[in-house]
Amino acid sequence: MVGVDFGTLSGRAVVVRVSDGVEVGTAVYEYPHRVIEETLPGGDVRLGPDWALQAPQDWIGVLRNAVPKALAASGVPASRVIGIGTDFTACTVLPTTADGTPLCEIHPERPHAWPKLWKHHAAQPHADRINALAAERDEPWRARYGGKISSEWQFAKGLQLLEEDPEIYHMAERWIEAADWIIWQLSGVETRNVCTAGYKGIFQDGGYPSEDFLAALNPAFVDLPDKLSAGRPGLELAPLGGLAGRLTARAAQWTGLPEGIAVAVGNVDAHVTAAAADAVRPGQMVAIMGTSTCLIMPSDQLAEVPGMCGVVRDGIVPGLWGYEAGQSAVGDIFAWFVETSMPASYAEQAAVSGLDPHQYLTSLAAEQEVGQHGLVALDWQGGNRSVLVDHDLSGMVVGQTLATKPEDVYRALIEATAFGVRVIVETFEAAGVPVEEFVVAGGLLKNGFLLQVYADVLRRRLSVIGSEQGPALGSAIHAAVAAGAYPDITAAAAAMGKRFTDAYVPDANRADAYDRLYAEYRRLHDHFADGALLHRLRQIRNDAIRNDAIRKDEIGGNGIGA
């Protein structure tokens, strides 16, 4: 079985044994274009603030490179592979023609023709309008999304596309999640998976928001559901673990896999990870911690959780409600700090010690007592996904003095992300949705100090996934179900998934100390939650960026994305 995980900066493939989930081969392909944030490829067209795009050919590059290399590394003959499953970041969405051609291949000079990555936050004003109108009309779907939808999602990005480049909007016969687009390329079958439609496309109780709601936003916006549903309003959403189609001859040539093997229905990176950790039962919350953090949890209860990303029937495993919440930036915050604030002397000492910058700062931070740095931070450098649902918020560190050291700030940032998770967990439980087990997965698993901080802050024992390739393994598990090797995701996860319980246990004394710091975090959180000051600062920044771009355009004649 092959699982392919399409991430933010790279894609990875893993070859997995169907009987027990043992990973026998893996390979990674770094995206040549990475995240497109400043200028469009091959030109001088500059992008505006908070833009983040990707290149579809980078995704095809994963199929052409990572899959054959993983297969070669495994030593498994291609003829023994019976299926392939994939997962993607969400909401990464792109405009295409009716045959799936990305519009950026037709109009590479137009920013809105390119896929908008999940962390494209330039649609926040459009999300604000959607939320304000939905609140005014008391739209019934609001409660399923904690009262607000995100600027990262399909409708906010679609409204931005319509109003900033209506020509590209009208050319787009499809507005499709990359998770579904890649399945289209593999199988030749156009599908829409229940996960992204529900969590990112406001699809609830059999339909999208009503025509009159969309018309009230913009009369030309009423056809977005047609673009989302492949021009077929009655299109049935594809179930997770389902068979989307069979591998085409073209995709077989790309991947080196046999033509005709099973292609599983597309899914989201976080949501497939639940299967990889065998955490698909009610109350098992999985935190997929990497550049950002996504928290997902199956439940047999339907409740309104303020600020959650969504609750979708069958959204993680068929037969249960699936909850999602998250943080827009976690690993990205630590990377930003290292890239912008780590002194050269620290970098030199890290090199002498044989450590990378993160390991070196972590080693220094770990020597401190809780609260010794005298700091508290807000983890909003990438905005706030849950529970405030506002990507125009920004982070801060309070308490710095002339004696503050880089490791002090680094530790405060780690603690802030843990405090942010505690807010989310407490919000779920206050709404009557219990968290029975907290399971950690993702790239930040390698930082044991960080995980211990989380255990202490949450006052919970942490389980950890038994794989470094959680999403790719989860995709392979879904493919095993699609290929008929297992009757359902729960059975496949029990056989192929793995986790270690009680891997991190809270220390009572540190937990007590963190309660004091968390109280200060909550005061700071609640004080700045309305965004008044932070929104004004962002507007001042955006105005200055645009004025600078206009000045440079007058000098050099270059364009800028809206």
Image (cartoon, rainbow, N blue to C red):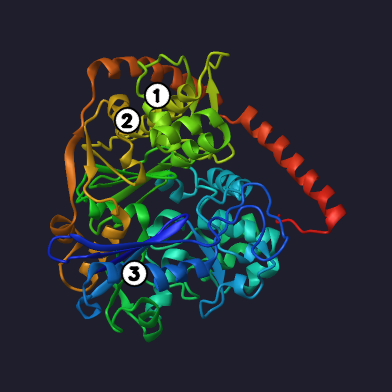
Neighbours of disc 2 within 10 Å: few (<14), some (14-19), many (20+): some
Q: Where is mark 2, residue-wise?
A: 449
Local SS, label 2: helix
> Mark 2 to mark 3: distance in Å?
33 Å
As drawn, the label of residue 365 is: 1
Amino acid marked by disc 3: Lys
Q: Is residue 379 visible?
A: no
> Mark 2 to mark 1: distance in Å?
9 Å
Q: Residue at x 42, y 56 (%)?
A: 7
Could you tell me residue 419's position as x and y percent?
39, 28
**261 left or right of 30 in image:** left
Q: Quadrant of the C terminus?
A: bottom right
Could you tell me residue 150's position as x and y percent?
51, 47
Q: Quadrant of the N terminus?
A: bottom left
Could you tell me residue 95's position as x and y percent?
56, 68
Neighbours of disc 3 within 10 Å: few (<14), some (14-19), many (20+): many
Local SS, label 1: helix
Asked if the residues shown at circle 2 and circle 3 are in contact, with their CB atoms under 8 angstroms apart, the answer is no
Asked if the residues shown at circle 2 and circle 1 are in contact, with their CB atoms under 8 angstroms apart, the answer is yes
